[in-house]
Amino acid sequence: LDDVQNSNVMDKYKQYTNDEDEEADPHPYDDDEQSVNSQSLTLENPYDKRHAHRQNIDDKKLDALKKWKSRVRFWSILLILCSGVLMYSDIWYANLVGFAAGALALYGTQKENSEFLFVYLVLLFLELLKNVGVFFYFVSGHGKSEHPTKIVLSCIFVVVEEIVVVPGNVYNTFRLYRTIKYHQSDDLDETLSNWQ
């Protein structure tokens, strides 16, 4: 008797749950949850749900590219100017790295070539190391043949270049490098994250 009652209860439970499922979803997907709903008029792209304005994506790519190109141009010109001031010291030959790096950045931004920008980043790190050496050269007293005002001016420009100009260049150049890399591909999420 218990077995019969249990089977009746189970049958009623199955019938009840089947009735609820049919009411909840009149057009259930078969076994594949990723299949297309045949009742839908259009195919839904899950990417469109996150980015409703897909028509503006190309405009945002170009805007991001223009923004970072103009910033890299500004910072590379600032690097060239600082290197120009530092050319008036005893060790003028050490400051040729700044001129070469700035010229390379201007050329790389004009051509939108990521390889030139990568080399520019490497030269910026060399510029950081060079500035440390030049600062210690002047502080240790090796530049005694120069006028004291010239030594102080050189030290100030080395410090400004080390703390402000080169880190600004590195940041903006890296962002332009990433934007160019993603502009050449179709990775929209990373391109849009560069626009922040």
Image: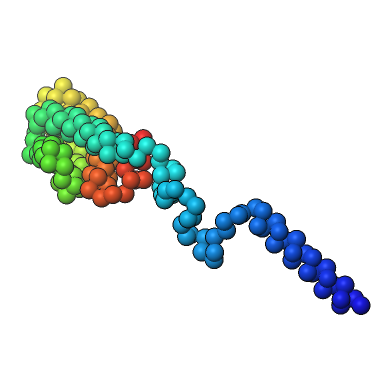
Location of residue 7 (image quadrant)? bottom right
Q: Give how far across and how far down residue 12 sits, in percent.
A: 79, 65
Q: Dividing the image into 4 quarters, which one contains the C terminus?
A: top left
Name the colour scheme: rainbow
Location of residue 104 (image quadrant)? top left
Q: Give how far across and how far down residue 148 sits, in percent.
A: 15, 24
Position above or below: 92 against 48:
above
User: Residue at point 22% right, 33% down?
Assistant: 66
Position above or below: 65 against 113:
above
Q: Give how far across and how far down residue 172 sits, in percent.
A: 26, 37
Q: Dividing the image into 4 quarters, which one contains the N terminus?
A: bottom right
User: Residue at point 87% right, 76% down?
Assistant: 4
Does the rendering let one see residue 194? no
168 and 173: which one is in front?
173
155 and 76: which one is in front?
76
User: Residue at point 11% right, 39% down?
Assistant: 107
Total numbered badges shown on the rendered structure: 0
Q: Give how far across and how far down residue 136 sits, in percent.
A: 22, 38
164 displayed left or right of 52: left
Location of residue 123 (image quadrant)? top left
Position above or below: 78 against 20:
above
8 displayed left or right of 141: right
181 displayed left or right of 144: right
User: Residue at point 18% right, 44% down?
Assistant: 117
